[in-house]
Amino acid sequence: MNTLSAQINSMFILGYKGEIPSNELESLIKENLGGVIFFAENIMDRDRFKQVVKHLKSLQSNIITSIDQEGGRVERTKNLPDKIEYMPPLDIINLPVELIEKHYDILTQELVDFGINMNFAPVLDIHSNPNNPVINNRAFGTNSGDVIKFSKIATDSMRKSGIMTVGKHFCGHGEAGVDSHLDLPQIDLSMDELKEHILPFQKAIEDGIDAIMIAHVHFSAFDEEVVPASLSKNVLNYLKQDLQFKGLIISDDMVMGGVTKGYSSLEACIRAIKAGMEMFIFRDTTPEVLQLLKDLCKEARKDSELLEKISIASEKIEFLKNGITLKTAFFSSITAKTDIDSIKSTYKIQ
């Protein structure tokens, strides 16, 4: 992978509409695209989806195949006729540890059976603001101790099966009062207060989490300028230098209002790359995204700092992708569904 275009392609994880990937997406996969992200609209039939993933891997053997499968509100398999309804993190923490482990082992086995090798989980945010419109029961608790304890169970389950884990949403989305899908939340905690929200990320890093997703949230403790953390050099430097994170740094979806209301896609990506961002998520392979990839090439050829950052990020991504391996796992949707339903019934969880 030597060309600038291939390096830039490697920094993107793209989605698609419907069940069948577009020709444009398939072409990019052949040209070293970093990864593909799957949403509920892509997963309507278990066997068809498995064939799609298998086909995409035939185009590039080490492509990242990613999903947001948290359980509860964020569950991309919800359209399957034989779906398994996993429990949200905030509910599951009331179960005995051995049942929590079983729950996440089933979730993980399903992902492995599909051919998924990266899950945008666990959520490491603290449910500190009861009026938070976007985190709420996606969190593992209302304090850092619970989030650390229970998120590790989910992380361990995924990692032992070869699925890369992505802690989110750094520096902590729990205190926000605005949905970053719609607008830019601003969190005005002091650094001492914010460190409580950073603790679960710090512990996950110490435990070897593969990647961290950065929030489209402004943290005044890091920046006087109102800028999303995903574009903040101060935030990313703190993550790399103070927390000594050596893994992959990934943006939240770049079509969210938390970033698009203040920046064009090109401006946002350039600023984020210079700040230290290494991969970007765009939920669809639109003509605008295709043009963005071309425009980034043009800008990098005349901007030495941007060019150097792209080279460093792409080398890191290539190293990670070359290490992608999946262990063999067997999965029975009927058995798994029965197990989850039994757990819910026993502990009176809806």
Image (tube, grey):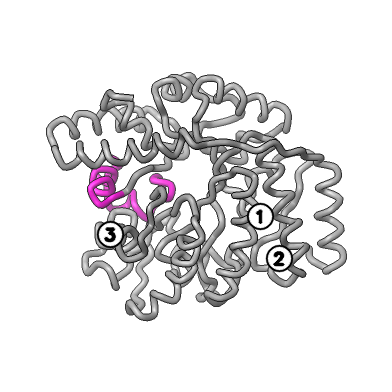
Q: Is residue 255 left or right of residue 68?
A: left
Which three-letter amino acid code belongs to the residue tagged 1?
Gly
Magenta residue span: 252-276
| Circle 1 crowding by C-alpha within 10 Å: few under 14, some 14–19, many from 20 | many
Give me the C-alpha separation between circle 3 and circle 2: 34 Å
The residue that mark 2 highlights is 92
Estimate the x, y position of residue 79 in percent, counting from the top left. Answer: 70, 41
Instruction: Indicate yes or no whether the magenta region holds residue 210.
Output: no
Decide which of tag 1 and tag 2 comes sooner along the chain: 1
Of 45 and 11, which appears nearest the observer? 11
Mark 1: secondary structure: strand
Which three-letter amino acid code belongs to the residue tagged 3?
Asn
Quadrant in the picture for the N terminus: top left
Estimate the x, y position of residue 255 in percent, counting from the top left. Answer: 40, 45
Mark 2: secondary structure: helix
When the figure is inspected, residue 277 is found, relative to residue 52, above or below; the finding is: below
| Mark 1 in CB contact with mark 2 (< 8 angstroms) | yes
At x 24%, y 43%, the residue is: 270
Estimate the x, y position of residue 178 in percent, counting from the top left. Answer: 44, 65
The residue that mark 3 highlights is 237
